[in-house]
Amino acid sequence: MLETIKEWKRLLQARKWMKQNASFLPAWHAYVGYETDLFDAFAYGEETTDVAERNGMDAQLLHNWVDTGLVLGHLYRKGGRIHTSPAMLEYVSKSSPQSVGALLHEMMELHIPTLLRFPDLLQGERKPSFENEKFGSTVAATSSLLEKLAFPKVSHWVRASQARSILDIGCGHGGYLLKLASKMEGLKLIGIEQNEDVVAQARKETGSSPDTCIEFVHGDFRQWEGPGAPVDLIMMNNILHYFSPEQRGVLLDRARQLLSERGSVSMITPLYMTRSGQAFSAAFNNFMSSHENLYGFPTEADLETIAGEHGFRVKEKHPVIREGSWYFVGLEQA
């Protein structure tokens, strides 16, 4: 009898893990459709064999992918043809300006492969180095998804601190600076970014707004001589993981050197193990610590301590995505 109970418990555990693995299927299916432009291919209704032949794809694999999409609701059948659902066309297709497909790309090609190496890393395999030149554009694209939620808090801080000159460290495609320029007149705006391709894209996007004047610098903030004059605000959005805990102190010291007398620092960053974002921050820190040149996020206490040790104090701290542990943090000079 006892052995029978143990066997049933074992089967229930197997069933539990099988069900949890099933939740991975929608993300995998959406990723494949995004990477291969299949959602666009079926946008107006097509037969699977025609799409396979036109794109030189394996017909059997495509049929399987289509069957999966029908089950998940990513695709639907109408009049004997396969169609892409409106939601997938709007939010996963590469051709849509509303697409979040870059997030799937980052998760599937960067995060998951790294986490799958965790057993070997635990056994002492050398940690890989994060390739900023390779993945910088992807990270910049996914970081921009945060901007809509985070920008109101950033703009409030700019107005409250009466900042007239702003430096954005690791500015990515310049989204925050572009939004600030469109909302407030007379701001002096500078962005510095290490990835050359990302800087080129930022300049291109700024060029499409002829009334916007933003200076973009290609370089490493740690070696950069700085702007010509002190600035009122330094933004550090989604960059703390590039700096070790010791380097973060150096970063704040350098920021103080470039700030005006009443200047301040603002951050958009995950905080480790906040009450409502523990799962996300734990997963993220596992990924970061699996690289030799990336570092885990600080706790709220860590951030307050390092700010105090380097001449700042935390004045404001507000959640941006509570369940993801993303926060806006405003630092003023002590």
Image (spheres, helix red, strand yellow):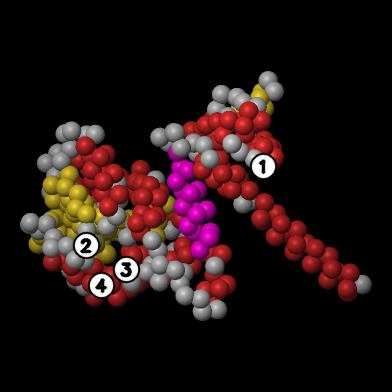
**Residue at mark 2 to residue at mark 1: CA–CA distance:** 47 Å
Cα–Cα span, label 2 and label 3: 12 Å
Which type of secondary structure does the marked residue at label 2 adopt?
loop
Badge 4 density bin: few <14, some 14–19, many ≥20, Cα 10 Å? some
Quarter of the image that includes the C terminus: bottom left
Find disc 3 in the rendering and name its residue.
243
What stretch of residues is rendered in magenta?
A: 99-114
Of labels 1 and 4, the one closer to you: 1
Could you classify mark 2 by the number of other residues whose Cα lies within 10 Å: few (under 14), some (14-19), or many (20 or more)?
Answer: some
Q: Which mark is residue 249?
A: 4
Amino acid found under the numbered disc labelled 3: Phe
Which amino acid is tagged 2? Answer: Phe
Instruction: Name the residue that disc number 1 marks.
Output: 61
Q: Mark 1 packing: few (<14 Cα in 10 Å), some, or many (20+)?
A: few
Query: Mark 1 or mark 4, which has the lower sequence index?
Result: 1
Task: Report helix, strand or loop for mark 3.
Answer: loop
Q: Quadrant of residue 205?
A: top left
